[in-house]
Amino acid sequence: MGVQIFDILPKKELEIESLTGKTLAVDAFLWLHQFLSIIRQPDGTPLKDSKGRVTSHLSGIIYRSARLIENGLKLVFVFDGPTIEFKKSTVEGRQALKDQAEIRWQGALSIGDMEEARKAAQMTSKLTGEMIEQSKSLIEYMGIPTIQAPSEGEAQCAYLCQKNLVYGVSSQDSDSLLFNSPRLIRNLSITGKRKLPRQDVYVEVKPEIIELEDVLKELGVTREQLIIIGLLVGTDYNPGIKGYGPKKALELVKNEKTLKNVLKKIEWDYETPAEDIYNFYLDPPLEKDVKIDFKPPQPDKILKLMVDEHEFSQERIEKVIKILMSTKQRNLGSWLK
């Protein structure tokens, strides 16, 4: 998912405390897909309530957001708009992979291979319209602003950062840099650990900051050339050019300079012209009349949604509400800015 060029990008590790008091734009769809993929039972089944409704996305939103807010961060969730036409083939391709993963999941369950079952299950997650609306409601009940992008959420996040409405963009993808975000924050978590595949070993994952100015300076390219590198490696809108990883793509772009010259050196055998994707990164649809409005949390609505409707632990949800309310009182001025 997204442009994978991290191997060549300069990055710096962060302590979460360094983000205290800062507002971050969250790529909402990416977070939701993460929660649906990771928050699962040992056999790969997602969290569900007694009616069989998936609740992994709600669990991820409320607990991760509360931990970050408790540590002094402010969040703004940005939701994707309708899928752009030339992204639809990518979405269809991902669905085919999910269908294959579903078969592998059921096969692993049938032979009792729980590790393989969970691994396959993580690739089957599907974000529905109902989940999106539930997520928006919960976020708003928590007093956190939501913004509906007209198209790509990461493009809208980048715009907020350009306009100094937020400090940075929270995402695992580098697309926001191609959309001209000054700062990208990866691995945003209070306690970040990742399990190594097929090993009972966990490694610490710390937040990282990638600044566009540093990227362009260290790589010796322009933002336009960074977009071309993305096209060569592969984006959400096109597969990469066979044989081109980030380093080889960087070398070609530095030698050829422009998209026109690069296209003379490769075979662009895709339905969508490279120029259309390039121009989309340069000038995406955006909501420019944006107001970020932090509001008081609504405890009754949080309890009704999470405890009454979806059967979360009342004790745990009340602890989250206390965090939200105490943070609101402690930082009243900054919350209302």
Image (tube, helix red, strand yellow):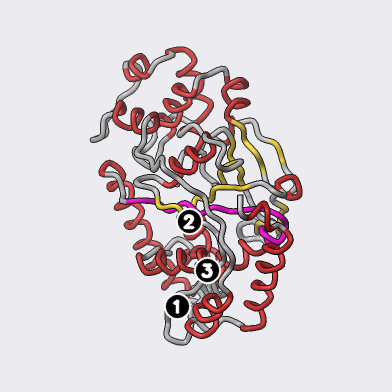
* Front label number (1 vs 2): 2
Q: Where residue 146 is drawn, which disc sits there? A: 2
Q: In whole angstroms, how far apart are the C-alphas of marks 1 and 2?
A: 42 Å
Q: Nearer the viewer, residue 331 or 287?
A: 331
113 up-or-down from 214: above or below: below
Disc nearer the start of the sequence (2/3): 3
| Badge 1 density bin: few <14, some 14–19, many ≥20, Cα 10 Å | few
Structural distance between the alpha carbons of marks 2 and 3: 11 Å
Above or below — where is 20 with respect to 220?
below
Residue 75 lies within the magenta run: yes
Which numbered dot is residue 141? 3
Are the residues flagged by discs 1 and 2 in contact, CB closer than 8 Å? no
Q: Amino acid at mark 3?
A: Tyr
Give the labeled residue for mark 1: 110
Label at residue 234: none
The picture places residue 337, in percent across and down from the top left corner, at: 61, 49
Mark 2 residue element: strand
Q: Nearer the viewer, mark 1 or mark 3?
A: 3
N-terminal label among 1 and 2:
1
